[in-house]
Image (spheres, coloured by chain):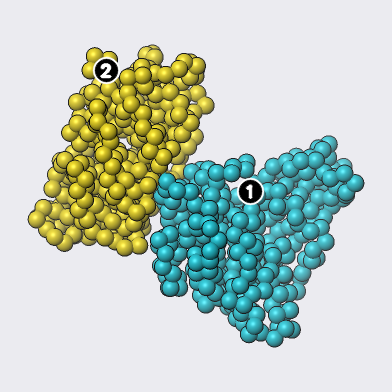
Chain colours: A yellow, B cyan
Amino acid sequence: MNADLETFQKSNKTELERRGSIFNIRAPAIESVTIRNQIAVGFGDGTVRFFQSGFEPKTVKAHEGVVLSMAKYADDVLTGGDDGRFLKISSDGNIEEIFNFGSKWVDCVASHKDTKVCSSGKTVYVWTKNRDKPQTLDHQSTVAGLAFDDKGKRLAVSRYGGVTVWKLNNNKWTSSNYTWKGSHGTVTFSPDTKYIVTAMQENQIHGWRINDKADLEMRGYPSKIKSFTWVGDTPYLVTSGSSDAVCWPFDGKEGPMGRKPIVVANGGKELATFVKALNGEKAVFTGYTDGSVLLAEIDESKKPIMIRSSTGAEVSTIAISNDNSQILIGDMKGSILLSSLWADN
Amino acid sequence: MENTSQVPVTVLTGFLGAGKTTLLNRILTEQHGRKYAVIVNEFGEQGIDNDLVVDADEEVFEMNNGCICCTVRGDLIRILSGLMKRADKLDAIIVETTGLADPAPVAQTFFVDQDVADRTKLDAIVTVADAVHLSSQLVDHHEAEEQIAFADVILLNKVELVEDNDIVKVNDRIRKINPFAKIIKTTRCDAPLDEIVGLNAFSLDRVLDIEPDFLESDHDHEHDDDVTSLSFVSDTPLDMDKFQDWFGNLLRTKGQDILRSKGILNFKGEDERYVFQGVHMLMDASPMGPWPKGKDRSSRVVFIGRDLDNMNLKEGFENCKSA
C-alpha cells in the first residue's frame, strides 16, 4: 500500500499552515475543548490557553504542574491537575476551585449540563445542580476514564477489569458492571448509546453492547490506542494506534462483530496518535507520531489531504470549532497550529 | 536502544524501618542542583513533604496477554505518563515500594508498557536492608529475600548497631542470594547519591561487569523455596540455535521462579559478544561489540531464583556448547 503521508512529506508548507498561525508554547499540549468561537488547550506547564482566530492567545495559570484532563462545561472548562485541584475556568481568566484533593492527582474530568464530575484515585466525585457537596462513587481500582452518554443519564467509569456504568434515578446511583480481563483506559459511548468502548493497556480496544453485555474485541494494533472519535452517520469508531486510521463500523444489530475495519490515511512508518471527526462529514483528521496531520474520507478509494506537515513531535490534540471553520492542532512539544479550514473564510 | 531523553527511574525497596524515608528525604533535600520526583506509597512511612512527591496506591495488574507471570504496576504507568507531560524535565524519578511488595511488577512495567519504555528507563533497583534485622526477616518473609534477590545495589544500613563479625555474616547471607549486587554499608543511609541514582544498572552494557570468578553455587540452603543463585562459565563457544531454544523454553516454563538472569555469550562463528538480562520471563538481549583483544572469550551466565536445582540448568547450559 502507498503511504499517503510519504508522498506529501516531500512538499513544503501546507495550505493551512500558510494561512494559519503557529504558536510555540514550549510545553506539551495535553487536551483541548471548543467553547463558542474559542478553543481552550491544557498544557504540561499547568496553563490553559484560549485560542481564537485573529487574537493573541489568552493564558490562564491554572495548575502547578500538568493539566491532566479537561472537559467543556457550558461556556467554561473543567480541568483536573497533578496539584490535586479540580477547577472551573472561564475564558476571561476567572478560576473557581471546585475541590482540592491535596497531594492526590485529579486524573479525569467530565460534565453534562449542570453536572460536574472528576475522579481522584478510585473514587468518582459528582456535583449535581445546587449541591455544594459531591456524591461519591467508589471503585476497586483507580479510575482511568469517564464518559457521559448523550443524554447525561448514564456515566461510564473505566478501570482495571472493565467498566462500571452508573445510572442516576431519584437522586440515587445504581451501577452495572461490564467485565473484561485487563486494564481499561479512555471510555466512550456510541452516539446511539447502544455500545460502550474502551482503549486497553493491551494494544486493543474492547466494546460491550449495553443491553446484553455482548463483548466486542477489536485487536491487531501495533501500539496502544490513545485516541478515538465517532465519525459520520454509520457511525464509524475511528482509532489511533496503527499506521492507518482504523475505522470500525457500528451500524446494524451486530456493529463491528465479525467485520473488518476500513483503513484510511496511511502514515507509512509513522503511527497515528490522535484522531478527530470533522463534524457532520464522513471524514476524519489523523495526527501522527511525527506531528503531521491528514484529512481523509472514510473511503479507501479516496486520497487524503495533507493538513499539517511534520513538526518532529507527536500530535497530542486536535480541535475543530463548533461551526467547522477553525482547526487547532497541538503536539507534545507545544507547537500549535490555528488555521481556518476553508480557503474562502 | 539507548535514548538520552529517557528519564532514569530508581526503584527503592526495603522493609519498613530499614531507612527508606531517611534516604528519600536526603535525595529531596540535598543541594545537588537536580530535579527528582519521588513516587511514594501511601501505606509507607510518613514524613516526606515536597512538591515533587506523588502519592500512589500500589496496583498490580495482570496483562491480558497469556503470560502467566506478567504483572505490571498500573499506578506507575499512569503516574509516569503524567510526569512525562511536564514542561520541565526531570533528572530522575524514584519509586518507593512498600516492604511487603514484590519488586517484579515494578521492573516488568518498564519492559511491557511502550510509552513508559519510550520515555523512561529503569535505572537500578536499590534495596535498603536493616543490618540488625535482615537475618530474621530473610527467615520470616519471602518478600525480604526477593528484595535482596532483585537488587542492583543493597544499602546495608544501621551497621553502627551491629558487631563486625555479625556484619560479615549478614554480608555472606546476602551474597548467597545475590552474587552481583553492590553492597554499601551505611549509617543513616549516608552513601553518596551518585552510588544510588544514575547507575544505568539495567543497561545491557553493564552486564559486561559480571565477574567471571564470583561465588560458586551454594547447595546448603535450608528450604527448596529459598532464593539462591547459580552461575556457569564455558570456554567452549555456544551454538546460537541451541542456546535460544533452551533459554527461551526455560524462561517460558520456569520464568516465574527465575527472578533475574544475566549473561555474556560467546557464540560460535560470531565475532561480537552477546549480552542479555531478564526479569522473570521478560528479557532484553543485544550484541555488544567485539570481544576485547587478548582476553578469553568465555560465556558466563547467572541465575537468581527459587528451585533452581530442579531446572537442570547445568545440563541445559552444557548442551548448548557447539560440537
| Residue drawn at point x = 83 percent, y = 61 percent | B213
Answer whether labels 1 and 2 touch (C-beta < 8 Å).
Answer: no
Q: Secondary structure at mark 1?
A: strand
- Name the image quarter holding the N terminus of chain B: top right
- Screen quadrant of the C terminus of chain B: top right
Can the viewer see residue A182 in this picture?
no
- Mark on residue B283? 1
Q: Amino acid at mark 1?
A: Met
Residue B15 quadrant: bottom right
Alpha-carbon distance for marks 1 and 2? 51 Å
Residue B17 picture location, percent across and down: 52, 77
Q: Residues within 10 Å of mark 2 (few under 14, many from 20)?
A: few
Above-or-below relation of A290 to B75: above
Instruction: Report the side of B197 relative to B295 (left or right).
Output: left
**On the image, numbered disc 2 is attached to which residue?**
A342
Dot in front, 1 or 2:
2
- Residue drawn where x is 14% and y is 53% of the image: A128
What kind of element bears circle 2? loop
Residue type highlighted by circle 2: Trp
Whole-percent x and y of residue A44?
Answer: 38, 45
Q: Is residue A210 above or below residue B35?
A: above
Do we see residue A84 in this rendering? yes
> Mark 2 falls within which chain?
A
Q: Which of A66 and A288 lies nearest the eye of the viewer?
A: A66
